[in-house]
Amino acid sequence: MSDNTYPSVNDLTLEEEASLTSGGDAWHLQGVEAKGIPGYMITDGPHGLRKSLASNTGETDLNDSVPATCFPPAAGLSSSWNPELIRQVGEAMGEECIQEKVAVILGPGVNIKRNPLGGRCFEYWSEDPYLAGHEAVGIVAGVQSKGVGTSLKHFAANNQETDRLRVSANISQRALREIYFPAFEHIVKTAQPWTIMCSYNRINGVHSAQNRWLLTDVLRDEWGFEGIVMSDWGADHDRVASLNAGLNLEMPPTYTDDQIVYAARDGRIQPEQLDRMAQGMIDLINKTRAAMSVEDYRFDVDAHNEIARRAAVESMVLLKNDDAILPVSRDAKIAVIGEFARTPRYQGGGSSHITPTKMTGFLDALSERGVPVDFAPGFTLDLEPTDPALEAEAVIAARDADVVLMFLGLPEAAESEGFDRDTLDIPAKQIELLKAVAAENKNVVVILSNGSVVSVAPWANNAKGILESWLLGQAGGAALADVIFGDVSPSGKLAQSVPMDINDDPSMINWPGEEGHVDYGEGVFVGYRYYDTYGKAVDYPFGYGLSYATFEIGGVKAVKTGANTARVSATVTNTSDVDAAETVQVYVAPGKADVARPKHELKAFRKVFLKAHESAEVSFDLDESAFAYWSEKFNDWHVEAGEYGIEVGMSSRDIAGVATVALDGDGKALPLTEWSTFGEWSADPVGSKVVADVREAGERGELPKLPDNDMMRMFLGSMPINSMSTLMGESGKAISSFMLDGYAKLVG
């Protein structure tokens, strides 16, 4: 056997094949040394490399890892709406994996932010599946361009931490297809992640790890996934059932390879299925071999830190800027209040916790710039009550300042993997401090640190400016200084709505479930799809974000390019004296539909950097999927014929222009039967001919006439034709028989 190739499953014993379907330890694949198959390392992501210092022993320590660049978690990076920048982050992560001999980094996580209380919202991308998929694909493409694998996770419907190891997410097929699958589907079809990690939870009663419909029928057969599926750590509860369902790799190992061997021998696992699962593992090792063979590689620490800084800059969302309080003048007398300015919360807690290569808080950045400030911590980063002495010190610091920069947010104890939040509010002691400071000085800017949205409305009147900075990674302090002092204009846009009250969220009626299950009763009406459709007031809408510049969008046009496709164009102009970027957002608004559809849905976007007073034309091609919904009647995607609005704007509630296209529809129709209503017969291309024949036969006296008054026609329209006799007696029976016979002749 050549040193440059690995064997196929045909070269392995049954025992060796079985061993490939389980890890060697918590952080390594299981190699077959005798056949030259190495046990490469795989480690956590998703916003940087978390290689545990104990990983070589197979142990787990979430807070002790080798230094790596901590990029902004998805909570922030998603607000960049910049796929090219996100790919650069992915490329940098791939280079760091090469240095550390890591074959697969576990991420990105593209589960939907169904409810803003979700404990892992900080590492997920959006409430919108289109945005999540079209951003996170950059991580996959970037990492894998370096010869290192990614693990797209958590497939699927892992949208809460409460009871996450066993809860059954009970979801309609339509909601799965329109909300919870599309980010995964887009990334699979466009970037082919080398691995996918299945979720802990059950979907409609079946654990993801042993759900053949999920892992084989949908993922492989429908979407064409070519990689391997691994379990989340401890998500595989039945190795035989999981392998048969399409799970290649159990992680971490339970040291039960003999179960697979016995099942293969007694016929519970077919040889072909074991071959497929084991060959997938060999193929993965082959893909990563070149990168894992690079010796003495060292990534550029400073260059990666600069990427992290640019990513942090674009992650921030300016929510409020009354009286143009930002940017801050360099000669202003500044008070900085809040412990987060000195001790930044730059990442989330749990399995994604990274040891950064360097760390710059906001006070550090000010020191580097030589900017003098009066600093007061104001509060402690825990859930303890207010410290009166700290509050008094902060009020004094604020009293004589030209501007007060207040750093507020959620301490790590308030949100993390492992539990869901129970409130949108930031700690009360911080709000009390803000009120006390604002009573002394009205020129307050609040800089928020949080992994998911927090309530803003209750305290916003105490601040002239609000900058949502999320969790900014290791270069966040320098990035904040860049934005606050106007070196660059903020350009972030919200990837999730900010509700007025958590009880406004439609999922709350079923959150977080009961007795081992959670019903996704809101269906497809998640986030702005609910708020905008039902006219619900929000604090800040999806896609919202201010700039130091001003922009206009005009000339919105939509041209039909095919039966069910269109091209959209518009002109965006920077109407200010400030160079800055704006994100043009395209929403599709369906007209009258056979099912309940959201008012509009994001279907395209582009971030455009424009110099002062510069204009640019942007165009977008919308394919059939932009107009389709998942029809449970057809068990397939369906485009209805009719008019669709194409909305172009700067948020879901700031629409600059609307154009209309009339689509042909896909022509799908179910065969008509005795259970089809008279109205369905009338609307069907073939059925309508039969109905016309009924009317003509009635006029000739060959059949009873159909009812001719409005009330009777209303009842008839919604009635299956096998029930027409209840309305018309024997006449109805004769008409329904005539219709069924006539239809059979026409369809052959």
Image (cartoon, rainbow, N blue to C red):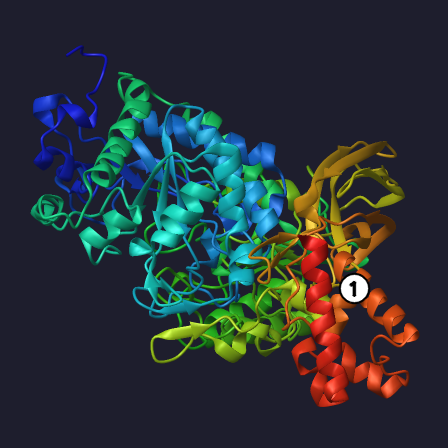
Instruction: Characterize the local packing of mark 1: few (<14), some (14-19) or many (20 or more) Cα atoms within 10 angstroms.
Output: many
Left-right relation of 739 to 281: right
Residue 369 position in % (x across, y down): 58, 37
**Residue carrying label 1:** 690
Q: Quadrant of residue 619?
A: top right
Residue drawn at (87%, 45%), measured in percent from left and top? 552
Work out whether residue 289 can be spotted.
yes
Residue 606 position in % (x across, y down): 71, 39
Residue drawn at (34%, 21%), measured in percent from left and top? 298
Q: Quadrant of residue 719?
A: bottom right
Using the image as rendered, state which of residue 675 and residue 558 is in the foreground. 675
Using the image as rendered, state which of residue 296 and residue 512 is in the foreground. 512
Q: Amino acid at mark 1?
A: Val
Residue drawn at (21%, 39%), measured in percent from left and top? 274
Using the image as rendered, state which of residue 333 and residue 222 is in the foreground. 222
Residue 421 position in % (x across, y down): 44, 70
Work out whether residue 443 can be spotted.
no
